[in-house]
Amino acid sequence: MADQTQPWAERTVEVPPQPVPEQRDPFRRGVAAVGRPRTPRTEPFPTVEHGDWAAEPAPRRPMSWHLAQARRGGEWSAAGALFAFVCWGIWAISGRGNLVAPLLTFVLSLLTAVGLFALARLLGRLILERQLGRVRRSARGAHMITALFLAGVGVAYLQQTEWVVSAWNWVTGN
């Protein structure tokens, strides 16, 4: 090799070609790797024969199943309750008085929300399950109605707080 002054100008060492060992090709046309079958995530609909319209009533489900269905969507009610609690806290602290009466109003508001949730579930059962024959898989609708009510309660608490109303009027320019 010739004497080179620049290190980047060096040539690499030539290696004679070596034969590549024969390898089995993992790709085979028309063959797919298949795993084990997954279990279906939904329940199949029951089939009804033509002469079997009023056969037997739906099977009774255990209480744990009903409670699990009622918990689905609970994050909506929890968010509404948290908003109402924060707004209630602002209202109660700004009153600078005894907290017994404001605490009683908040507890009554929560009990009203629970009653509204129960009413929404009852109406859903009567209308969706009995009249329309649908199976309810969650309580999201009832939880959304409850959250909307609790958000309204929170806004009502804020509307009774003088400095929040004056700050709102200042921001909106009224």
Image (tube, rainbow, N blue to C red):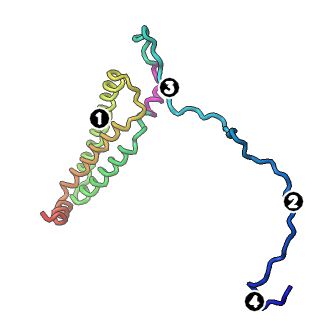
Which residue is identified by label 3? 44
Q: Amino acid at mark 4?
A: Gln
Residue displayed at 41% across by 34% down: 138
> Are circles 2 and 3 on residues that touch, CB within 8 Å?
no
Badge 1 element: helix
Q: CA distance from mark 2 to mark 3?
A: 58 Å
Which residue is identified by label 2? 19
Quadrant in the rendering for residue 150: top left
Of discs 4 and 1, which sits in the foreground? Answer: 4
Q: CA distance from mark 1 to mark 3?
A: 33 Å
Q: CA distance from mark 4 to mark 1?
A: 87 Å
> Are circles 1 and 3 on residues that touch, CB within 8 Å?
no
| Mark 4 / mark 1, whichever is N-terminal | 4
Farthest left residue in view: 174
Instruction: Decide: few, some or many residues near mark 3? Use Cα within 10 Å; few <14, some 14-19, many ≥20.
Output: few
Which residue is identified by label 4? 6
Left of 38 or right of it: where is 47?
left
Stretch of the chain drawn in magenta: 59-68
Of discs 2 and 1, which sits in the foreground? Answer: 2
Query: Which mark is drawn over residue 115?
Result: 1
Q: Position of residue 120 (x, y in %)?
A: 30, 33
Of discs 2 and 3, which sits in the foreground? Answer: 2
Q: Amino acid at mark 1?
A: Gly
Quadrant in the rendering for residue 15: bottom right
Farthest top residue in view: 51
